[in-house]
Image (cartoon, helix red, strand yellow):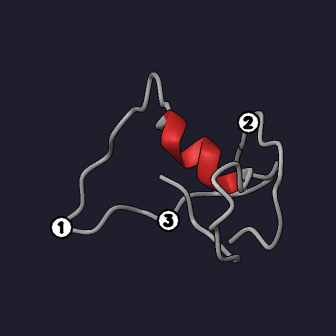
């Protein structure tokens, strides 16, 4: 969760992290591309002046 306006360029799993093993009801997805709605960027930057932090965009 963000506590203040933040410029977020990328996120990655910390080095050394190991995903858990899938269970019987799990699936694995390979994400090739991801984006964020531009209105979420406005909210994160508080460009509309009504953002209440913390905020989880997306």
Q: Can residue 36 be spotted in the picture? A: no
In the depicted structure, whether residue 12 falls above or below residue 14: above
C-alpha distance separating marks 3 and 1 = 13 Å
Q: Which mark is residue 6?
A: none
Circle nearer the viewer, 3 or 2: 2
C-alpha distance separating marks 2 and 1 = 31 Å
Q: Is residue 24 left or right of residue 1?
A: left
Q: Residue tagged by mark 3?
A: 20
Q: Secondary structure at mark 3?
A: loop
Name which residue lies at 83% across and 66% down.
Answer: 4
Please state which of residues 13 and 50 is positioned toward the viewer in this rendering: 50
Please state which of residues 48 and 42 is positioned toward the viewer in this rendering: 48
Q: Where in the figure is residue 6, as x and y percent of width and height?
A: 83, 52
Q: Is residue 30 left or right of residue 42?
A: left
Q: Residue tagged by mark 2?
A: 10
Q: Is residue 42 left or right of residue 25?
A: right
Q: Residue tagged by mark 1?
A: 24
Name which residue lies at 81% across and 57% down.
Answer: 5
In the depicted structure, whether residue 12 falls above or below residue 55: above
Location of residue 19 (image quadrant): bottom right
Please state which of residues 58 and 15 is positioned toward the viewer in this rendering: 58
* Outermost residue, front side: 49
- Which of the two labelled residues, at mark 3 and mark 2, occupies the earlier sequence position? 2
Q: Where in the figure is residue 38, as x and y percent of width and height?
A: 53, 34
Q: Can residue 52 be spotted in the picture? A: yes
- Which of the two labelled residues, at mark 2 and mark 1, occupies the earlier sequence position? 2
- Which quadrant: the N terminus? bottom right
Circle nearer the viewer, 2 or 1: 2
Query: Dots 3 and 2: beta carbons under 8 Å?
Result: no
Q: Is residue 11 left or right of residue 37?
A: right
Name which residue lies at 33% across and 40% down.
Answer: 29
What crowding class fits label 3: few (fewer than 14 Cα within 10 Å), some (14-19), or many (20 or more)? few
């Amino acid at each position: 969760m963000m506590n203040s306006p933040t410029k977020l360029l990328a996120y990655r799993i910390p080095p050394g992290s190991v995903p858990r093993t899938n269970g019987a009801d799990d699936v694995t997805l390979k994400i090739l591309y991801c984006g964020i709605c531009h209105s979420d960027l406005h909210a994160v930057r508080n460009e509309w002046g009504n953002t209440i932090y913390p905020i989880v965009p997306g």
